[in-house]
Structure formats: structure tokens, C-alpha cells
């Protein structure tokens, strides 16, 4: 199974490295490999969250996300998205933006480079993506769940989470604080607007997925009132199809986009060449993230390692905070990646420990009953 799932990613990686060599010799190959590792390290928590949502979708929509969705992730976020940002912020059409990326102006010409334009747009991007991810984190951590990981913290948070719309209140207050203390006068208004749009996007996509999922379950159960159905689309149990699955698909695409912001911006610390970025982040990194997602779904690892989902959401919360802080201060991409890996790794190890305790307790009970 491992060979079948990761074989495509290995093949795509090999082809991408060959293309990179033809395009720019061994230096391009090295840059592609570095970007691929960067993307996987930054997006491992993304793969875990993707898997939790995909488990709720029908086989058809899983295939749609893993085919059409990956094309959007590769070409949309890793190649077209930076061009669109340059188009919007600098008034350059995508063709001119691509030309600027491929042919950077000489130093001292007075013309802004492609990399500089994207860097200047980072505060708005960080505010939008940070608020989307922060809302996702809050909605998870403020909900009551049978399984908790950090009991001393998650249980009290779930208790206060009974207050209606608390996630929106916390997110809105956080946005005001970010705009006040982490933004200069030039960017304050745009950060408030971008952050608000991030909140609106999350609430809309998540709410629509929840609405249609609830209606679908009610119809299947012959209960048009929808009572007893899951409250949120992404956290529902039944397999979503039709409109419900479509909005979950949109939810995943926006989620992937939010995770991609830091990787795309961080890539420019390594190279400004859009072709190398597309090969490294998109074809290599995104394909391996796709394979990890498939592996988690097919093997049922999320059920076996019970705390992985919790660790991924805490990593998301940390990433959201990093995006907020990066509005004012530069955060090294290594730190961003290591924080996500640390949370996932801790959740994985504690899941193994919990499974061993359960098996030991079961063995003790069986021994006692026999005696």
C-alpha cells in the first residue's frame, strides 16, 4: 500500500528534478529539493486536517479533491496565486507579472521586483490566512469532544465554548489587537479588512457545508427537521455527497490556500523564480502532502492514533499566531515548520502511549477474569 500511495509522488519528484536540471542545472535541482522539503514540513498538519475532512466525504468527492484539488493546489496556489497578488497590489496584469518574475529589473533601476511586491503584500495575506486558520482552531478547541488530548486545557476551553459565538468574539478581538499592535498606520485598515474577509470566508464555507450536510442526513433519516445532525460540516460523521460534499471541497481548497501562504512567501527567501517555486512547492511538496493525506485516510491512522487530529489543530493555532506576528516581525520558516512537526510528533507519541496503556489494561482484565 505504501508503494502504491507514495509511488506517484516519487515519480513526480523525479520528473520535476529532471525538468529543474534542464531548466537551470544542478543549482535548480537543489533549490527544488529544498522547497519540496519546506512544503512537506510546513504542511504536514495540513495533511492531517485534510484527512479528517476527506473521511467524511464520499469516494467520488475524495477522488475529486485528490485530482482536481491537487491541480488547483499546484497551479493555482503555487504558480497563479503569486501572479494574482502582484496583479492586484501592483496593478500589473498576470502576463506582465510573470515577465517581471522571469526577468527581474536590475538593481538601482527604481522598479520594484516581483519578490518585493509579494513581500509588501504579506501583511494582507497573513491577516486573511491567519484569521481563517484561527477560526478553524477555535471552532475545534472550543467544542466538547469525547476524546481530549491536553485534558487540563482542552476541557476548560470546551466548557467555556458553550457560550454561543465565542469563537467569533475571540477571533474578532484578536484581529483588533493584531491591527493595533502589529500593524503600522499604512497597513492597519487593509489588515482589518483582510482579517475580516478571512473570518467571513471561514464562517460562510463552513456554514454552507454544515447546512447541506444537516439537510442531507435529515433526508436520509426521513427527518426533515434535521434534529440530531452534526453541527458542523467538517466534523460530521456521515459520508457527505452532493452539495454538502461540494462545500466541503471548497472548504478544503480555502484551507489549503491558507496553509500555502506561508510556504509561498517563505519560498522567496530561497528563490524568486516562479518555475522553481512551482516545481518545488507544487509538484514535489504538494504531491507528497497529497500522498500523506491518502495514507492517513486509507490506513485509518486517524482512528488508531487518536490525538493526531488534536495535535494538527494545535499546530494550526500556532501557525495562525505565527502569521499574525509575521505582519510585523520576520519569522524563520524553519521555526514555522518545526512547531507543526513538534505538535504532530507529540500527538503521535502520546497516541501510541495511550494505546499501550489500553492494551495493558485489557490484558490485565482478561487475566483477572480467567483467574
Image (spheres, rainbow, N blue to C red):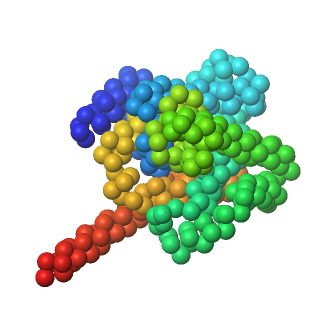
Q: Is residue 291 above or below residue 156?
A: above
Image: 294 above or below 319: above
**In the displayed structure, would residue 142 be above or below residue 235?**
below
Query: How many numbered marks are there?
Result: 0
Residue 287: which quarter of the image?
Answer: top left
Residue furthest to the front: 222
Residue 120 location, x and y as percent? 72, 40
Residue 2 in the image: x percent, y percent?
A: 25, 41
Judging depth in this view, the residue of 25 and 200 nearest the camera is: 200
Which residue appears at 67% of the width and 63% of the height?
162
Quadrant of the drawing holding the N terminus: top left
Q: Is residue 126 visible?
A: no
Does 1 sit left or right of 156 as displayed?
left
Query: In this view of the protein, can residue 371 be seen by the observer?
Result: yes
> Given the current orientation, which residue lies at the most extreme left position?
371
Identity of the residue drawn at 69% across and 39% down: 204
Amino acid at each position: 500500500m505504501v508503494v502504491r500511495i507514495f509511488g506517484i509522488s516519487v515519480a513526480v519528484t523525479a520528473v520535476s528534478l529532471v525538468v529543474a536540471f534542464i531548466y537551470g542545472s544542478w543549482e535548480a535541482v537543489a533549490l527544488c529539493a529544498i522547497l519540496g522539503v519546506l512544503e512537506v514540513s510546513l504542511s504536514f498538519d495540513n495533511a492531517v486536517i485534510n484527512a479528517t475532512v476527506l473521511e467524511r466525504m464520499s469516494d467520488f468527492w475524495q477522488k475529486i479533491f485528490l485530482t482536481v484539488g491537487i491541480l488547483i493546489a499546484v497551479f493555482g496556489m503555487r504558480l497563479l496565486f503569486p501572479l494574482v497578488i502582484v496583479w492586484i497590489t501592483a496593478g500589473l496584469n498576470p502576463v506582465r507579472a510573470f515577465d517581471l518574475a522571469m526577468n527581474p529589473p536590475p538593481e538601482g533601476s527604481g522598479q520594484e521586483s516581483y519578490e518585493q511586491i509579494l513581500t509588501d503584500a504579506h501583511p494582507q495575506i497573513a491577516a486573511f490566512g491567519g484569521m481563517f486558520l484561527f477560526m478553524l482552531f477555535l471552532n475545534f478547541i472550543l467544542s466538547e469532544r469525547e476524546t481530549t488530548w491536553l485534558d487540563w486545557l482542552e476541557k476548560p476551553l470546551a466548557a467555556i465554548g458553550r457560550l454561543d459565538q465565542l469563537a467569533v468574539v475571540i477571533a474578532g478581538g484578536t484581529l483588533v489587537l493584531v491591527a493595533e499592535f502589529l500593524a503600522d498606520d499604512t497597513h492597519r485598515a487593509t489588515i482589518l479588512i483582510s482579517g475580516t474577509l478571512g473570518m467571513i470566508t471561514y464562517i460562510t464555507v463552513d456554514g454552507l457545508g454544515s447546512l447541506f450536510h444537516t439537510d442531507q442526513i435529515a433526508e436520509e433519516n426521513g427527518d426533515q427537521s434535521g434534529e440530531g445532525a452534526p453541527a458542523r460540516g467538517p466534523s460530521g460523521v456521515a459520508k457527505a455527497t452532493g452539495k454538502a460534499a461540494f462545500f466541503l471541497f471548497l472548504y478544503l481548497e480555502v484551507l489549503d490556500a491558507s496553509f500555502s501562504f506561508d510556504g509561498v512567501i517563505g519560498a522567496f527567501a530561497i528563490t524568486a523564480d516562479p518555475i522553481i517555486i512551482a516545481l518545488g512547492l507544487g509538484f514535489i511538496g504538494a504531491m507528497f502532502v497529497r500522498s500523506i493525506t491518502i495514507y492517513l485516510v486509507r490506513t485509518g491512522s486517524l482512528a488508531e492514533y487518536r490525538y493526531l487530529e488534536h495535535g494538527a489543530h494545535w499546530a494550526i493555532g500556532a501557525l495562525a499566531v505565527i502569521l499574525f506576528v509575521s505582519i510585523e516581525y520576520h519569522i524563520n520558516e524553519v521555526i514555522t515548520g518545526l512547531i507543526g512537526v513538534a505538535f504532530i510528533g507529540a500527538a503521535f507519541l502520546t497516541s501510541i502511549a495511550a494505546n499501550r496503556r489500553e492494551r495493558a489494561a485489557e490484558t490485565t482484565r482478561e487475566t483477572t477474569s480467567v483467574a
